[in-house]
Image (cartoon, helix red, strand yellow):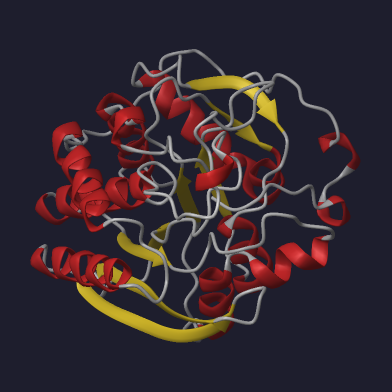
Amino acid sequence: MGRSFFISLIILFFFFSACNVGVPHEPYRLNDLPEFNADSAYSFVVRQVAFGPRVPNTPAHDSCARFIEEKLRSYGLLVSTERFVALRFDSLPMWGVNIFASLRPELKHRVLLFTHWDTRFIAERDSDSLRRSMPILGANDGGSGTAVLLELARVMSQMPPDVGVDFLFFDLEDQGPAEVHSMIDFYRYWALGARYWSRHKPRGYHPLWGLEVDLVGARGARFSIEDYSLYYYGYLVKRLWEIGQALGYDTLFVDYRSRGLFDDHVIVNEYAGIRSVIIIENIPHHFFGSYWHTHRDSLQIIDANVLKAVGQTVLGAVYNVK
């Protein structure tokens, strides 16, 4: 997850203050859902962390990209990669790869699920100043969203939904500078893989909606309703929170509206024109967890039950598309 930012130019006046959004609590009827396997998703986090920090231009980055591609192909999905070069804020060329996989590619009606799989190249928020220049493992920031999408791909390949599903793993999301001085800096240096894909997406590709998952595995996580998502496609946001609560995850999907976060979903909305929302840890009054952009972002903070709560909720949305 990159730096947060409040894009005032696109937010209506009523988004300026956080408030309770009043998600209904009446019984919510769902179609039969496959089971999201928490242990399987956790194993995908373990596998990624075992490569080390997945920072561009490193062997760990290359190995993880191959792992994601091979895993998706093993589920019978149609997989393609998009390789590109982008300049980091300090002019370092970075070799990136976006990974796109389609389930039931023959279907016209589709939904897009996406995350980022790269990890932060510095730990600028770490309490140990001597380690701030070192890359982080990114078990949650990069690892959890990727793990959830891989498990979703596995489950859906065994019990396909009535709509086509595309899985998109963005690279170079988290390589921006530690200090950001303007909105231009955000658009220039963060979410580079999402920006590249959005500008080069196939002509005529128009999914019904997009959903990003990021920072979705930390112990004690809370998912409040993010303002930009509410602006871009409030119906889907409310539906997701209704589903999460109906499945028994009301302590995670909380009835609280939080500040907007600059992430890949903003780029996909603005550049690709795809209505997209995000599920992301956004603890009321606290923002992200204390592990964020530190070396505490390791396997020790990952809770398989949180991965399951998010994955099962996404399944509820995909298998109940309206």
Residue 202: x and y, percent? 46, 84
Residue occupying image coordinates x 55% and y 79%: 196
Give the quarter of the image for residue 18.
top right
Q: Is residue 85 left or right of 118 when viewed as pictured? A: right
Residue 255 left/right relative to 72: right
Q: Give the residue at the far right of this rendering.
A: 13
Residue 95 in the image: state x and y as whole percent. Answer: 44, 82
Q: Nearer the viewer, residue 154 or 44?
A: 44
Query: Can you say whether 106 is above or below 21 in the image?
Result: below
| Above/below status of 104 relative to 291 | below
Residue in front for this viewpoint, 312 or 123:
123
Residue 260 appears left or right of 33 = right
How many marks on residues? 0
Question: As drawn, which residue projects farthest toward the front?
Answer: 130
**Residue name at image x 27 percent, y 72 percent:** 59
Point 36% across, 29% down: residue: 301
Vertical relation: 153 (above or below) 295: below
Residue shown at the point (9%, 66%) measured from the top left = 74
Left or right: residue 61 compared with residue 5: left
Q: Is residue 30 visible?
A: no
Asked if one can make out residue 133 in the rendered structure from this viewpoint, the answer is yes
Q: Is residue 254 above or below residue 38?
A: above
The spot of residue 298 in percent (x, y) is 35, 38
> Residue 148's x, y, as percent?
30, 45
